Every structure is written in structure tokens, then in C-alpha cells.
Amino acid sequence: MTKQIPALLIIDMQQAMALPQAGERNNPQAEANIARLLAAWRAGGHPVIHVRHMSRMPGSPFWPGQSGAAFQPAFQPLDSEMEFEKNVPDAFTHSALERWLHVRGIRRLLLVGVSTNNSVESTARSAGNLGFDTLVVSDACFAFARADYHGTPRSADEVHAMALANLDGEYARVLGSEQALALLAAD
């Protein structure tokens, strides 16, 4: 495994994700953990990338110009940080993210954000398939409750755990925020 500090990739930390109508979610501490990681990455001068979902469906809270599409104040990008917009779950599809990373020699990514089973999982799968050393921080992302394919209601914790299980060892390595912070200390 490479010793390179991974770029911190923050996915879809937008205002609409904090609305009650987003649904029952898990990991209520996720935002605090993301904020800790963001502060540490900024303090070390390491690459930070913000991804924002911009819906193609009028009326969506993620529609351009809607307040829900804006970043949450705690995750507002700095001028020195890169920002990518997407309109599908995967941050690599229809964006210049892969090229931007390659040009800078970035081969390692630390993914955080929402939702674990959608944009985080989709982006992690692509990153792994593209050959990036991909890490997903389990307590710095969250999911929402939903029914499975058979209509059985699944809690947000169950959805989150299944998404992480889908990724771990196949497309990414799943770790906790303390382990992620230790990556900086090991440098």
C-alpha cells in the first residue's frame, strides 16, 4: 500500500441532506467526524475535494439555484479546494475528477459523505475499478432507511452496513475516522 496521504473526497454534504424530509438516517455523529477530518486535512495542506449533486429533475431540492443544493456551511469549500458537480450518484461519471486526480499524481482517496449506499458506494466502486487506493470512513458517512427489493423495510443502520460490506475488500477498505486521522500522524 502506498504511503501517500489520500485526498479527502467529501460527497454531497449539501443542505438538503440535513432536512427532516430526507428521512430516518444513521450515524448522527457523521457531520462532526467529517468536520474533524476536514480540519485535519486543511491544517496539513492535503488535497480536499468537494462533490455536489445537481439534479436534472425540476422540483428536486438539489435542483440548481435551490437552497438544498448549496453546501452545508460547515463544508463550504475554500478557494484552494477543488469542487466537482455531478448529476448521477457516481462522482467520476460525466466529470473531470479522474483526470484532475491523475494530473496531480493522486492515487489514494478517502471518501466521506452521503449517502453510503448511493453516491458514496457508487463513487467508491468506480474509484476502486479505476485503480485508486480507496478508503471509506464508516463513521463519516450515513445512509437513510429504505425498503429492500422485496419490500422489507430496512433501517438506516442496515442499509449503511450492507453498503459498507459491498465495498470492503472488493473496491475499497473501510475504516473509522480515528484510523483515518492516524494516516496523517503516520506521515
Image (cartoon, rainbow, N blue to C red):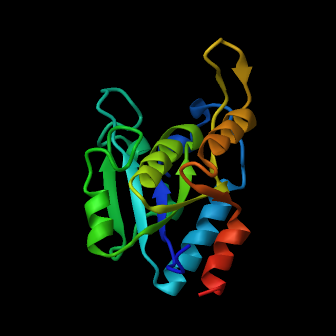
Q: Does residue 97 appear left or right of residue 150 in this picture?
A: left
The residue lying at 26 percent from left, 72 percent from top is 103
- Give the image quarter of residue 101: bottom left
Q: Is residue 80 above or below residue 176?
A: below
Q: Residue at x 65, y 70 (%)?
A: 180
Residue drawn where x is 55% and y is 71% of the image: 38
Q: Quadrant of the N terminus?
A: bottom right
Q: Position of residue 12 (x, y in %)?
A: 46, 49
Residue visible at 27% across and 51% down in the picture: 95
Q: Could you tell whether 58 is left or right of 60 in the image?
A: left
Q: Residue furthest top?
A: 150
Closest to the observer, 82 or 171: 171
Which quarter of the figure has residue 68? top left
Left or right, residue 162 beside residue 43 = right
Observer able to see residue 103: yes
Coordinates of residue 19 in the picture (x, y in percent): 57, 39
Pick the front one: 186 or 81:
186
Give how far across and how far down residue 34 sits, in percent: 60, 62
| Residue 70 visible in rendering | no
**Residue 139 vertical position relative to residue 39 in the rendered view, above or below:** above
Q: How many marks?
A: 0
Q: Residue 145, image x and y in percent? A: 67, 29
> In the figure, is residue 51 to the left or right of 43?
left
Image quadrant containing the C terminus: bottom right
